[in-house]
Amino acid sequence: MSRNAPFTVTWRKDLLGGVTVLSCPGKRVRQDGWGSGALYRDVSATVAAAEEEDVTLTWIPYYAWDNRAPGEMRVWVRES
């Protein structure tokens, strides 16, 4: 994800009974980019060879899925 990616704010009544989400352009590793699909693999070789595809990232507010008990959350997103 680019540090300067433009975010949009959208009300999604079809999601979680209605919630405001953030969206922005980003990339993800293709499902088939992981090779053989083996359970264990050399991550350094796999990540270097993996193909990425353009996607729209959807960011859901923490409160919308934290329905068990309050807690902390940290999200890591690789910057491109």
Image (tube, rainbow, N blue to C red):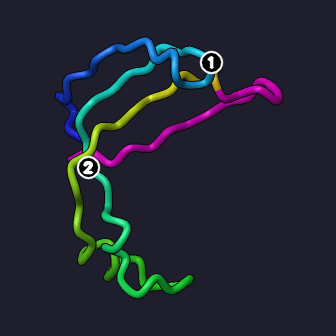
Displayed quadrant of residue 43: bottom left
Mark 2 or 1: in front is 1
* Element on which disc 2 rests: strand
Is 25 or 43 nearer to us in this picture? 25
Q: How many marks?
A: 2
Q: CA distance from mark 2 to mark 1?
A: 27 Å
Say if 62 sits above or below 42 in the image: above
Residue at the spot x=47%, y=14% of the render? 20
In the rendered image, which quarter contains the N terminus?
top left
The crowd level at tag 1 (other Cα within 10 Å; few <14, some 14-19, many 20+) is few
In the image, taking residue 77 as reference, residue 50 lies left or right, namely left
Residue at the spot x=40%, y=32% of the render? 58
Residue at the spot x=56%, y=14% of the render? 18
The crowd level at tag 2 (other Cα within 10 Å; few <14, some 14-19, many 20+) is some
Identify the residue at the far front of this view: 14
Identify the residue at the far right of this view: 69
Measured as percent of width and height from the top left, residue 42 is found at 42, 84
Say if 57 sits above or below 31 in the image: above
Say if 78 sits above or below 21 in the image: below
Displayed quadrant of residue 79: top left
Query: Looking at numbered disc 2 in the image, what kind of residue is underneath it?
Result: Lys
Residue stretch in magenta:
65-80
Disc 1: which residue: 17
Q: Which mark is residue 27?
A: 2
* Element on which disc 1 rests: loop
Residue at the spot x=33%, y=26% of the render? 23
Query: Looking at numbered disc 1 in the image, what kind of residue is underneath it?
Result: Gly
Say if 52 sits above or below 37 in the image: above
Q: Confirm whether the magenta stretch covers residue 77.
A: yes
| Prevailing secondary structure class for the magenta stretch in the rendered image | loop
Measured as percent of width and height from the top left, residue 70 is found at 77, 24
